[in-house]
Amino acid sequence: LYYDYGVVSVLMEFPFEGDWESLSTLAARWVPSAELEQQAEKVVRSRLERIAPALVRPYSRWLGEDYYIFLLSEVEGQPLGADLLRSHGSQIAQIVRGEHSELAQAEKEDALQAALSYYPRDLIVIGWNASLIYDTPSGAETSVQILEYVNSQLLEFRHYDELLTRELAAVYDSLKHRAGLLKRWQMRREASRLTTVTVEVTELVERADTAIKFVSNMFSARLYRLAASKVGVPEYKNLVNEKLKTAEGLYHFLIEEFHQSRGFVLELMVVIILLIELAYLFRGKT
């Protein structure tokens, strides 16, 4: 592909033991954390330096998404997921929002609305930049992978959005500085470049949509849809689709302008040929 890209994930794990107050303080300290994001970028850059000869047109500026998962594998009394949500809902809401203080009732209800359980003794509460999972490490593995995939997909759509924004801006700028017949004749090149980008982005978007077929059960599918809606995947996907429609309309405009210019040139050539023939005709008579 002309515009190839890659998504790199860095997983950092920190063990924790303590009470709910300590966990809430920890979440408020690290959600979000520029320090952890910078550390993750250092890790990625150090790895990429090893494979630098294999990279083609590497990006100098990267898009990034940080996401935090609090995994509770052991809770005193081993409560049911519903009981944990009921007894410690305020702390859970603080954790997924990364807040120091207790949230208002409406905010707490909004934060706890995105909660799912598959077995009686498991629970996952999803936020836009953090989630809390109450499960065994092996049981939480699938949920962690889905959350990782959702954030990778968000990065993909953000990349497509920026790419289409740049390409459309370049075409609009070109139209502003191009006037006259010869400039309009060059619009076919702009149209060809635009349609190449559009086709490639459309293919990548379709590939991202079909990649979720790896989900093996209905609960995982529900978890994916809930997490995607929380982090904003549908919104960015809609932005990309709207820009694809704009690019398609702009492509048809450029092609129409090119055809009009070509038709004018052909008509002008016919007129010139007729004038030349008439000139020779009158010269022969004289």
Image (cartoon, rainbow, N blue to C red):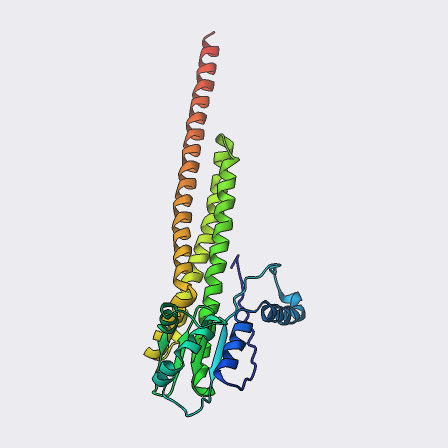
Is residue 166 rendered to the left or right of residue 266? right
Question: Residue farthest to the left?
Answer: 218
Quarter location, residue 64: bottom right
Where is 50 relative to 250, above or below?
below
Q: Which residue sits at x=35%, y=85%?
A: 83
Q: Which of 20 and 281 is in front in this view?
A: 20
Where is 15 relative to 271, above or below?
below
Q: Which residue sits at x=53%, y=69%?
A: 32
Is residue 104 rendered to the left or right of residue 186? left
Q: Which residue sits at x=46%, y=78%?
A: 144
Where is 77 relative to 117, above or below?
below
Q: Which of 35 and 112 is in front in this view?
A: 112
Question: Residue farthest to the top?
Answer: 286
Q: Nearer the viewer, residue 283 or 129?
A: 129
**How many numbered callouts?**
0
Q: Which residue sits at x=37%, y=81%?
A: 85
Quarter location, residue 86: bottom left
**Residue 199 horizontal/vertical position (percent):** 43, 55
**Residue 107 horizontal/vertical position (percent):** 39, 68
